[in-house]
Image: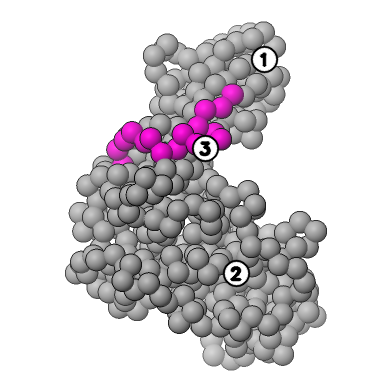
Amino acid sequence: MKHSALIPVVALLCSVSLTAGLFWLTRGGPPVARPEFDSFRSEAAGAPEARLKTPALPGLARYPREPEIRVALREQPVDSLTLEIDGPFRIRAIGGKTVLSRGQRLASCRVAVEGRGLRVGSTKLEADAVEIEVDQPPGIWVGGHEYRGNLRLFRRESRVLPVNVLPLEQYIAGVVDSEMPAAFPREARRAQAIVARTYALYQLEQAPRGAVHDLYASTRSQKYQGFQYRGEKNRLLAGESQSSREIAESTRGVVGLYEGGLFCTYYCAVCGGRTVEGSDIFKDAAPILNAVTCDGCRDARLYRWEAEISKRDAEAALRPLLGRAGKKLGTLKSLEPAHREKRGATAQYVVRDERQTVQVTGAALRQALGSKGLYSPSFDVQDRGQKLMFSGRGHGHGVGLCQWGARGMAQKGASAEQIFRHYYGGAALGHLAYR
Ligand SMILES: [Zn+2]
């Protein structure tokens, strides 16, 4: 999976969701009838003239039909989860035809491991991997999110891993709204759809044999909130929209290609003026993930930022990082760049305690101090006695498409294709055979 391809020992986020929940369509009341969403394709169809004119490449003929994508809804198996099903459903063992359980609906209940099988509410299932399907998706709620497609539950020792399986394009409609605000220009969102689709399919192709999922629903892969979900105070929020479905449809099957194959389309929220060389951060970065200038992200709040972190907090955050490298950090005395000129993911910083000095990279520092306000690996640091003052640029790892940069380019009239080519120079666009 993606995290194994990282150069630093630590996992960086592939992408950072831009949305603060402000842009969601909000609706009150319980989830009831939603006939307007029953037919994904016909409802989302429209603007066919806006489809990108792209060649069908032979290598992509292996997708004669729209593929399904498998999205892990938790990054790790969990002790239990809450499940609710609106409407008639069936539960089968994966790979089997026998229906283990069925019902007209399932009131909110707990799912957990029992013995060598699983318990769903009051029903014990003698299987360690089951699939739940509903007559009319969406309708399966997991932990307050409603999903299209089916739900798979896997027993992992004493824990459960939930995986949503759904057609790729429906997933893309969810990712577009989860990753990019509806207020962003249409062409930026279309570029986002192409990038998200390429990323997802690349992960699908890279998934090891026997893997039960291709992606995570979090920014560890790309953010995906499902069809709708309950937010604060139980308010119902949309996970996708008419707009995001149209965006997915108008770019249906379009992917980015490097040397005729898919590549990992890393992307970030705000690059801060210049993107980062992909190979500085990711082992599997395609050579086309070059650093490019980006004028479009100036309006982003985190284009430039400052963070004040006490040495005591920094010390606590750095201790596990150094511990993994076999170093025991005492009292943090100073943290400064090893070279005055160099900044960024691969720049070295010197951490000093009362006994030793240790060098760490900008990327590792960002990972360790991310929750304290270090938004990117591109920063300056000043020693202010008890405190460290960081001033930095951008939000995220900085590789590939800059989401706020795409917004800026689209505002100036750039098309999705032009945006894509700017951040992945040398890549081509093609379409999958199922389009
Ligand atoms: Zn940018």
Q: Mark 1 points at which residue?
A: 387
Mark in the foreground, 2 or 1: 2
Q: Which of marks 2 and 1 is nearer the N terminus?
A: 2
Q: Mark 3 points at which residue?
A: 300
Q: Earlier in the sequence, mark 2 or mark 3?
A: 2
Residue at left 45%, top 79%? 41
Region of the chain picked out in magenta, as a range: 289-306
Asked if 37 appears above or below 257 in the picture, the reply is below
As measured in the structure, the alpha-carbon distance from the residue carrying label 2 to the one carrying label 1 is 44 Å
Determine if the magenta segment contains residue 295: yes
As measured in the structure, the alpha-carbon distance from the residue carrying label 3 to the one carrying label 1 is 26 Å
Q: Which of marks 3 and 1 is nearer the N terminus?
A: 3
Q: What residue type is labelled 2?
A: Phe
| Residue closest to the eye, 302 or 253 | 302
Q: Position of residue 45 (x, y in %)?
A: 42, 77
Task: State if disc 1 and disc 2 touch (CB < 8 Å).
Answer: no
